Each structure stands twice: as structure tokens, then as C-alpha cells.
Image (spheres, grey):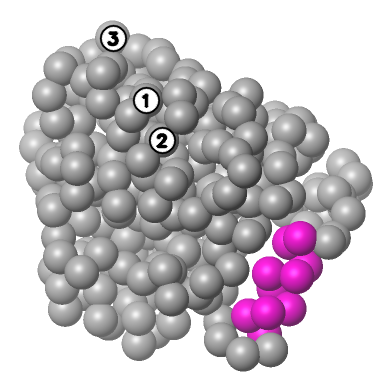
Amino acid sequence: MQLAVRESGQGPRTAVLVHGIMSDSRAWHRVTAELEAHGFRVIAVDLAGHGLSPRARRYSPGAWADDVVETVGPLLDGPPDVVMGHSLGALVASLVGDRLAPRAAIYVDPAFGFPSGVKGFAMKAFFAVAPRPRRGALVKMNPRWHADDVEIELATLRDWDKRTILGLADSRRLVPPQRLVAPSLVVLAEKSLLITAAAATAMRRTGMEVLALPGTGHTVFRDDHQGFMSAVVDWLTAQYAVPAHPAAAQELGAVGAVVA
């Protein structure tokens, strides 16, 4: 399936961004702007069932990954410099990485696991049947969000196909990469609902660098945008030289993260 794409920036490096469930490429607007300032061309997709992309008869992590590869592959001149995904998008990005061979991968509070038993069932059922929140409820639940992010969330929820939750019904598919296809950074919420301490330890054993940002919830890059971008750019700088943007250079000091 050909997906809707938001392509921007003309830098020498390429970043592929994959959003989480209920969202779409608009969620990355502030991340995209900063990546562009650091010399990236950004390709952000709308997964099937989200945003401007078509709906599918059936959803699954593998099918979403197939769509991303089919859509993004022809837009690339070679392997992307980084693939970044949030939540469901991180799971999809890990599957995409096996085929696009990025130079680096970043997984933001990834859906590499899910609570088991009654708790896990209740969470999935909530996603499927809960009414879309009103603006006031979103602001109350997410006091650290920028006002633009609240409006974007309301818009993306209107465009979201609730049937996508069926793509996560089988928790056996929600697993971290079995091998590293590239240097990998995992940025977690302070108290991730998806990644336990044991899971974080297991990911470190495979060679991933795992960080948690204090005070953040699941949508880490909205709750602490500056801390998130500092962590990302500092880490990418360690992988390869990222062109510094004069307006941002002074903000890229110590990483505002702690080890999970």
C-alpha cells in the first residue's frame, strides 16, 4: 500500500519517522523542524488507518512495515541515516530496519511489549471503545504539551481508524528486535507502560542504549521536547557528525536523561 508522506528539508542526511497508534505524521512537527535544522531531509509517513493514508481490511505490524518499505524505498538514494519510531511506530521501525538497513535507529517508548493478562486486555479494550477525548480533557491529561500538539492530537484522532487496535491483538508479535541492524537508542517515558525494567535490561544486553526522560509520559517528545531532542542529537552526534544549527547549538549540552 502506498502511504501518505510528509517530506521536508534538503539536508545531506535522511531521517524516516514513523508515528504511534492514533496519531500520524503531524505529531512529529517539532521534531521534524529540529532535524531539518541539523541537516536532515525528513520523510514522515502516515501508517495505514491513520492520517491521509488509506484504510486496510486487516492490520498487523508486518503489513505496516511492508507499506513503509514500499512507500519510502523509492524515495531513498541509499540507506537512511536514521529511522525513528514512537510506540507502534517503533515496532514498525524495527521491522523496517531489517530491510532498509539504516545507519542508526531510535525507538521512542516502543511497543516492544505489552502488559499481560487482564491489565493488557483492559488497555487494548480501552483504546478500542473509549470515546475520543475533548480538548479540555487532553490539556488536563497532558499539561506539558505545547498548544499546537493538543490541536494536532484532536485532528489525528478524528482521522484515526479504531480498527487499527486489532493489529496489536496478538501480543506475541510485540517484541524487540532480535538483532541490531544498526546502533540503536531507546528513549523511554519515566515510567513506561510498555517496557519493564527487565525488558530494558534485556535490550541493553543486545547492545541498545536505553535512556528514560524524567517527568515524561508515553509521548516523550511532547512532554519534554527539549530534553528529547538533546538526547537524540547528542546520541546521533556520537554516531556521526551532525551539522550544528547556530540557534540550537547552545541547547545541546548534557543529555537531559537518566538511565532507566
Relative side of 209 to 226, left or right:
left
- Discs 1/3, front: 1
What's drawn in magenta, residue-wise?
A: 119-128
Mark 1 vs mark 2, CA separation in Å:
6 Å
Q: Residues within 10 Å of mark 3 (few under 14, many from 20)?
A: few
Residue 37 can be seen in this image: no
Q: Quadrant of residue 79?
A: top left
Instruction: Name which of mark 2 and mark 3 comes first in the sequence.
Output: 3
Q: Residues within 10 Å of mark 2 (few under 14, many from 20)?
A: many
Instruction: Give percent across and percent down for residue 72.
Output: 32, 26
Amino acid on which disc 1 is placed: Thr
Residue at (73, 78) in percent of width and height? 122
Q: Which mark is residue 67?
A: 2
Residue at (14, 60) in percent of width and height? 180
Q: Secondary structure at mark 2?
A: helix
Residue 122 painted magenta: yes
Marks 1 and 3 in Cβ contact (< 8 Å): no
Relative side of 98 to 247, left or right:
left
Residue at (28, 17) in percent of width and height? 75
Q: Secondary structure at mark 1?
A: helix
Instruction: Give percent across and percent down for residue 150.
Output: 74, 38
Residue 242 can be seen in this image: yes
Amino acid on which disc 2 is placed: Asp
Instruction: Name which of mark 1 and mark 3 comes first in the sequence.
Output: 3
Q: Which mark is residue 199?
A: none
Q: Secondary structure at mark 3?
A: loop
Residue 28 painted magenta: no
Q: Disc 1 designates what residue?
A: 71
Residue at (41, 16) in percent of width and height? 7
Q: Residues within 10 Å of mark 1 (few under 14, many from 20)?
A: some
Mark 2 vs mark 3, CA separation in Å:
24 Å
Q: Disc 3 designates what residue?
A: 10
